[in-house]
């Protein structure tokens, strides 16, 4: 069992900003690996000679900036996605929590997965646009930007094209949740100590391992999703997709028929390689941003360390602490005036 706790010293808006900044920096630093993963999933011919050669060839053909194609869309998607996921997670965790405030790891993972599914469905068109921007040639683009891509896809292919591949995205949440749960229920056996005693380093390792296992299990659905997002008769070479299909089931069938079963895991290597730097940068950036917020709220003396401000009740909410400090400031001048 685990207890759902959230640091009340940071406001919801501050927490969202911290998550957005941490996510944007993590995405930007690992964008080349994400791009190679998407191109391999789609089956673009650049990746047929290996990932390193694909990166070098792409840079020579389209320039170094080509490695960050679609990254702006991914970063802009963070705010609405994070807001929806946090709101949905909060509601679901409250729903799954018992009378004592405890929640099992399975229910916590289920709450996070369901919240992720809600956020994914609502913001899914941006994911389609990101994939289209990645597979196009930057020097001869079919889309001039995010808004142009949205407009062109909607008018040429219809509204449903912006949700192409949403079915495998939702179905992929099932093996993803199962993989995460499998890791977390065995953590105490792996480390040979209770989960409540884990250090921050252990929690970081646990997160990376859980993400790696879950991503590997759900990757076939991710591959099919990317192929469905990229395929379009309006793009050169049908979006550079290596197989042609009529739907999700046919995409699975055609991929296995033409590429073998392992074709469903094309692009897994760069996807797994980005896990450690992605989570490492995200956690460290989020922690630093949180310390800046705690410093601005008056709970710690400096964002460079975690030394608590003397005389400050850490259980107070930010607004309560602000009101208390204002009362103190108003009281102290009166007191000094009386003493004079």
Image (cartoon, rainbow, N blue to C red):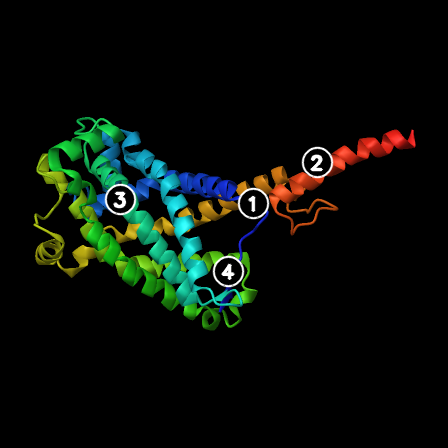
For the question of whether residue 184 can be seen, the reply is yes
9 with respect to 34 (left or right):
right
Q: Position of residue 51 (x, y in %)?
A: 25, 45
Q: Residue at x 20, y 53 (%)?
A: 167
Check contact, mark 4 vs mark 3: CB within 8 A.
no
Q: Determine the secondary structure under disc 3.
A: helix
Mark 4 and mark 1 in contact? Answer it, CB < 8 Å: no
Element class at badge 1? loop
Tell me the residue that label 4 is attached to: 4
| Secondary structure of residue under mark 2 | helix
Residue 223 in view, yes or no: no
Question: Which residue is tagged 2?
Answer: 326
Which residue has dot 1 on it?
10
Q: Earlier in the sequence, mark 2 or mark 1?
A: 1
Residue 61: x %, y % from top left: 21, 30
Give the percent coordinates (x, y) of residue 114: 34, 57
């Amino acid at each position: 069992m685990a207890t759902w706790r959230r640091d009340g010293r940071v406001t919801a808006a501050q927490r969202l900003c911290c998550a957005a900044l941490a996510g944007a920096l993590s995405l930007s630093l690992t964008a080349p690996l994400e791009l190679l993963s998407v191109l391999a999933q789609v089956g673009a011919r650049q990746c047929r000679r290996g990932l390193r050669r694909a990166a070098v060839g792409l840079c020579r053909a389209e320039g170094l900036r080509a490695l960050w194609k679609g990254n702006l869309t991914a970063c802009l998607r963070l705010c609405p996605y994070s807001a929806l996921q946090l709101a949905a997670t909060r509601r679901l965790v409250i729903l799954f929590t018992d009378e004592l405030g405890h929640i099992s790891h399975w229910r916590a993972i289920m709450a996070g997965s369901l919240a992720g599914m809600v956020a994914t469905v609502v913001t899914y068109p941006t994911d389609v646009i990101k994939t289209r921007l990645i597979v196009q040639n930057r020097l001869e683009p079919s889309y001039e930007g995010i808004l142009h891509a949205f407009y062109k896809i909607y008018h040429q292919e219809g509204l449903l094209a912006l949700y192409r591949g949403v079915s495998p995205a939702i179905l992929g949440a099932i093996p993803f949740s199962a993989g995460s749960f499998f890791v977390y229920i065995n953590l105490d056996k792996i480390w040979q100590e209770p989960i409540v005693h884990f250090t921050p380093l252990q929690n970081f390792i646990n997160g990376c391992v859980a993400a790696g296992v879950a991503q590997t299990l759900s990757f076939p659905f991710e591959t099919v999703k990317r192929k469905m997002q990229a395929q379009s008769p309006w793009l050169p070479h049908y979006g550079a997709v290596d197989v042609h299909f009529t739907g999700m089931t046919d995409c699975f069938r055609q991929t296995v028929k033409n590429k073998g079963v392992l074709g469903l895991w094309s692009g897994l290597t760069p996807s797994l390689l980005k896990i450690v730097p992605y989570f490492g940068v995200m956690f460290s950036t989020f922690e630093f941003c949180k310390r800046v917020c705690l410093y601005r709220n008056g709970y710690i003396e400096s964002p460079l360390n975690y030394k608590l401000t003397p005389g400050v009740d850490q259980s107070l909410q930010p607004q309560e602490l602000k009101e208390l400090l204002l009362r103190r400031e108003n009281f102290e001048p009166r007191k000094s005036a009386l003493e004079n």
